[in-house]
Image (spheres, helix red, strand yellow):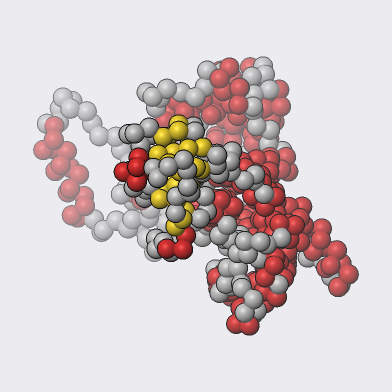
Amino acid sequence: MTIDARDILAWPGGDNNTDTVLSGLHFNITTLENWNYTLYSNGTLSNGTKCYLTFEPFAPALIFPNGTFINATKCWHPVHPIGARAGTGLGFAVVFGLSLVLTLVALNKHGKLHLPAQKRFHPIGRRWQWYWAIFTCATALISLFTNIDVPSRAHGRRFRHWGSWMERQFIDPDPFRLREEGRRYWIEFFLPLVAYLFMWLTPNPPPPDNRFKSAPFFLFAAWLLTVFSLWHSIKHYCPRNRGIINRTIGLFKFTPTRFMLIIPLAFIVPLFQAMVAWNFDWSPLNVKGKPEAIYPGGYAPALLIVIIQGIYGLLSPNEDRELIRQRRERGQTLDAELGIQRKPAWWRRVQGAGGGPNETMRDKIMRNVREIGGGGPTARNVKEAIHTRAAESSPNGPTSPQEDMEMVSIPSPQHVVGVTGPIAAGDFASARQTAGRYVGVMTPSATSRQAELMMDGPPGTVPPPPYTDRPPLGTGETGRNHSVASSTSPSINSPPVQVRSMLDV
């Protein structure tokens, strides 16, 4: 730093040539010059390394020959009381610091994933609004401690994420309900980009210059795009109303409460920028700026927006957990419409269900069957089904029970899975008798089958020779050779046999 010679003062006179008086106290000039101390017009004493105040009540009491001062006050010690602007700034800084902690807690809560990430909705989307809030608190702290204004411009990001969250809930029941194309998709894609462009083009904050007076209009355009984004999301993802009046009422009805507070606060930002552009007395860059205009217009809106967002983050659930809850409610509604009553979660633990690591697929199927069946209605339905099927399958009346018939087995009561009510044995006996009659009608005996095979075929055909049993071995005929000769000789001398069915083969 360059020091002007006019700032250096000569040593005030004392009792002799080696004595000087500073604030009524005597000091040795030889000792001061030996340690290269110089007296300046602002009342400080410095040698380039150390600096002390020489005016009352901060003047040192004594200096030793080794250059050490007694009861001295260094130059960087605050000697003037804190002003209104500095005190207000420290208060805002403390509140912004607490808001930063609140934002970090909200980020930890809402940034966690409880469902698989989707390509259409990236995890960064839900976290970005909290990143913006952290950036706002950090820049506000820097501004308050260093008087460098870095205003918040994060409100647009919050509205954009709300629209994305509404879209996610809208298509969760049906992923193909909205396509990732068309006018709606491209508006939602380019709208935040244009809003960010307007915000970043704004000087920060604008001095009273003609080329900077267009900055408030850029911020106002960004605010209008933010409001349009809110209206666009309500139009596509909320119930629609007809008529201008009903649409206006619906716009206020479906707008979240936090946005009803944030939108007016966000409008103060471009309004304050316009005031600063035309009046530099209200600018934070002015050392003598008016605190009553700087803090309410420059810092209070951003602080209130961050606090509102933090409270919302603590009270609202995680988005993934909210989707899980909505899916559970839709499943319960569908179960009620279909008449399905699902057992509570503790039922599986009480019944010892759940299986172990060695449970096979057969065990799982049997466990599911045991859970589904049960009660008197199941037993009654089984009885009715047995009697109904047996009655429907016997239109020609009963046949002789002594006939030779092929009959399917009817399950016994103890083999009916899932039936907890008693089933009388007579139910199965009557069903088995009726089913036997039906099988006797549909399945011919051996005698009737042989008579059918011996019937004449179509006209002009020769009936097959009568069936005879093969003589057993050891009855005067010599086994296989004779059987082959006797069976082949008629086929050579007689005309060929016409096959009537697969039973003749």
Vertical position of residue 121 compared to residue 447: above or below: below
Residue 240 coordinates in the image, percent (x, y): 78, 65
**Residue at point 58%, 61% (across, down):** 149
Q: Is residue 257 visible?
A: yes
**Residue at point 71%, 57% (across, down):** 291
Vertical position of residue 450 compared to residue 281: above or below: above
Foreground residue, 60 or 160? Answer: 60
Residue 237 coordinates in the image, percent (x, y): 69, 62
Residue 321 coordinates in the image, percent (x, y): 60, 41
**Residue at point 60%, 29% (across, down):** 372
Foreground residue, 193 or 175? Answer: 193
Vertical position of residue 283 compared to residue 183: above or below: above
The quarter of the displayed image where residue 396 is located: top right
Residue 179 coordinates in the image, percent (x, y): 57, 68
> Horizontally, is 235 left or right of 34 in the view?
right
Where the N terminus falls, by quadrant?
A: bottom left
Q: Is residue 225 visible?
A: no
Foreground residue, 143 or 486? Answer: 143
